[in-house]
Every structure is written in C-alpha cells, then in structure tokens.
Image (tube, rainbow, N blue to C red):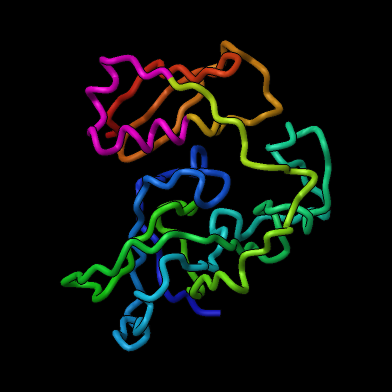
Amino acid sequence: MKIIAKIYNDYESKFGIPRQAGLVDGENSLIVFEPEYRVPEALRGIENSNYLWLIWEFSEFRDKEWSPTVRPPRLGGNRRLGVFATRSPHRPNPIGLSAVRLIGTVQTEKCGTALNVSGADLMNGTPIYDIKPYIPYADIRPDALNTIFGEDSDKLGVIIPDDFQKIVPAEKLPTLTAILAENPTPRYIDDPGREYGLSYAGFNVRFIVSGNTVTVTSIEKEQ
C-alpha cells in the first residue's frame, strides 16, 4: 500500500493523544497529501461530507511484535482480551481507523489542497493510506453496542493554576483541558502522588491524578 498523505497537529508524542477519535474535538489537524496525490480532481465533491474515515498506520508500532491477546488500558490493564476484540496498536498489521470531522479544504502554496479536520486521534506526522466519506445511512448502526468497553469514558475534573494558564496560548487551553479530562494515564497505575508528563503544542505539561481530578503541576516551553 502507498502512503497518500500525512497528518500534522500538536500531538507530538504517543502519550496524551486521545484514545479514540472524536473524544477531543477542539484540536484541528491538517492532512497534507504526498506529491503524487496532490491532484485537485481527487477531492472533487469532498465538501459534501462533514465526516471522513481515515485509514492510517500505527507508525510507532511498525516493527514491534504483535500478541494474540492484549491488556486494554481502559480496563485497567488487568484483563486480557483477544487483539481482534480491541483497538490495540499491537496488531499483525498496524492499521488504524478513525472518523474525523471535515472543517474544510485549505489551499497551501507548497502542498496544494490540504484538508482541515478535527477530532483526530493520530500523532503528528502519522502516515495515511486512504480517505473515505462517512456515509450515515450505511455507517450509523443504532443498535450497535460493546458490553466490554461500554459508553463514553467518565471525564475528570481539571485544575490548571492561573500562572500556568498564562503560559499556554488561549486558543490551545481548551484542547489541553479536554486532553487531561480524558485521563491519559494508564488505568492500571494507582499512585496519587505520581507525576506524569505529556507534550502538546510545543509545551511540556506535568500533572498528577488524584481521585477524579487532574492537577497541572508545571508547564514549560519545550526547547
């Protein structure tokens, strides 16, 4: 398969990326096509869709071994499930599938027409293999359920002290808050005093999780 595009955003490392597409809708990403596929005709009619399917590669897991069973972090890391019953990146073929919201097309001077999307759960620079329209009459299944993972995860309260809020650009603060509210830490670690760190939008954000609250302990501009 050929890489047709790459996605660019402020998710600079695996840790802290939303676990599923659409959980953090405020972060916009730019999909830039590879030179071979910068053909305007290939996007004709895409404006008729407000959601798109992305088929992409877990590029950080490309050369890692797969396992027939995995421990989903959502379940606390203590329960093993078959890899095909999960969305784990440790797969025989490290392929991801995400539905993202199409904001619109962007004309760039060097890269032709790009796509502005929101709600992506892809790391900055992730290769994309295909883009397809989301078709409601076929893709929405009202009776769909998953008795293991259930509904949307419970969000945590987030405390970002005023001094730290002034460091992050105002337009980035809502998305950072939403990322932390989704609790990016491993569910199998229960250590209220442990400090974690994630990279977002060029900032190193340190925080602790205690009970149902995330408290930011420091924010520093990355060098």
- The structure residue drawn at horizontal position 30% and vertical position 25%, both measured from the top left corner, is 220
Q: How many marks?
A: 0
Single out the residue that lies furthest toward the left. 109
Q: Which quarter of the rendered picture does the C terminus lie within?
A: top left
Q: Residue furthest bottom?
A: 41
How far from the left and from the top, in percent, is residue 71? 76, 41
Front residue of this view, candidates 211 and 76: 211
Locate the N terminus and report the quarter of the image it occupies: bottom right
Question: Height in image: 65 above or below 194?
Answer: below
Q: Is residue 179 magenta?
A: yes
Decide: is 70 above or below 115: above
| Res 31 → quadrant | bottom left
Instruction: Reply above or below: 169 against 49.
Output: above
Was residue 78 drawn as part of the magenta stretch in this picture? no
Rendered location of residue 112, percent (x, y): 24, 76
Q: Name the side, left or right, on which 210 lies relative to 188.
A: left
**Residue drawn at x 42%, y 72% as measured from the top left:** 49
How far across and down, in percent of the image, does residue 13 sit?
Answer: 46, 43
In this picture, residue 82 sits left or right of residue 104 = right
Question: What x and y, as percent, mark residue 187?
Answer: 67, 29
In the image, 48: left or right of 142? left
The stretch of residues the image draws in magenta is 159-180
Q: Nearer the viewer, residue 146 or 6?
A: 146
Q: Residue 201 falls in which quadrant of the image?
A: top left
- Where residue 217 sits, quadrant-wise, is top left
The residue that appears at 83% across and 55% down in the rendered structure is 68
